[in-house]
Amino acid sequence: MAELATIARPYAEALFRAVGGDNAQALASQLEAVGQVAGNPQLRQFADSPKVSAQQVFDLVTSVVKTTLSPKIANLLSAVIENGRLVALPEIAAQFRALVNTSTGVSDATIFSAFALDASALAETVATLEKRFGRKLNATVVIDESLIGGIRVVVGDEVLDTSIKARLEQMKVALTT
């Protein structure tokens, strides 16, 4: 949603400038946790009620988040709630993560696999993918049984698909043309 991205950008950039690279990864994790909580429709409905104060919303969000918040994240959360921008918090977290990744030369990678990957297989796969893409990767594994076998990797707008499903689709196209 372009509107949310427009609303979120100044908050993410301001937090990034305030952090200045110190503890940016830890703050990104905290902000993502707060963003997940803020993405809950029931919480948003609660926050939109005129009977609820900004402090009550703040207290609820901080009690649901499993980690203690740094003062900078707590200040951002307060500002977002007071300005009625709670709906933009997941997008703020995503944009902040992108700024942190850009500054550290790291990219987020989503690895879709037909089966769960054990720790050694994941480490080997990530090492191979880092060589392939030429940068450090933060990998997240998603199980997608429709792939039948192999993996599909998404890094930004780049896709590497070595799944059996993709190979079968390629064979289908080759045979029908």
Image (spheres, helix red, strand yellow):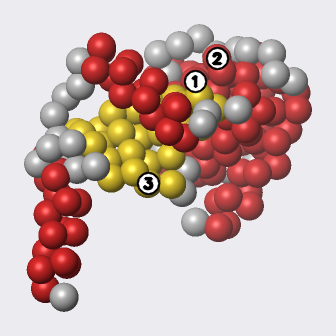
According to the picture, the residue beneath numbered tag 1 turns out to be 29
According to the picture, the residue beneath numbered tag 2 turns out to be 26
- Left or right: where does residue 38 sit relative to residue 41? right
Task: Please state the horizontal and vertical placement of residue 144, each as a whole percent of the image.
Answer: 20, 46
Q: CA distance from mark 3 to mark 1?
A: 25 Å
Tag 2: amino acid? Ala
Q: Which numbered dot is residue 164?
A: none
Q: Residue furthest bottom?
A: 177
Tag 3: amino acid? Val
According to the picture, the residue beneath numbered tag 3 turns out to be 159
Element type where label 3 sits in the image:
strand
* Residue sitting nearer the eye, 104 or 11: 104
Q: CA distance from mark 3 to mark 2?
A: 28 Å
Task: Please state the horizontal and vertical placement of residue 97, each as a whole percent of the image.
Answer: 64, 36
Vertical placement of residue 45 versus 115, above or below: below
What residue appears at the point 67 percent right and 58 percent down from the top-left corner? 5
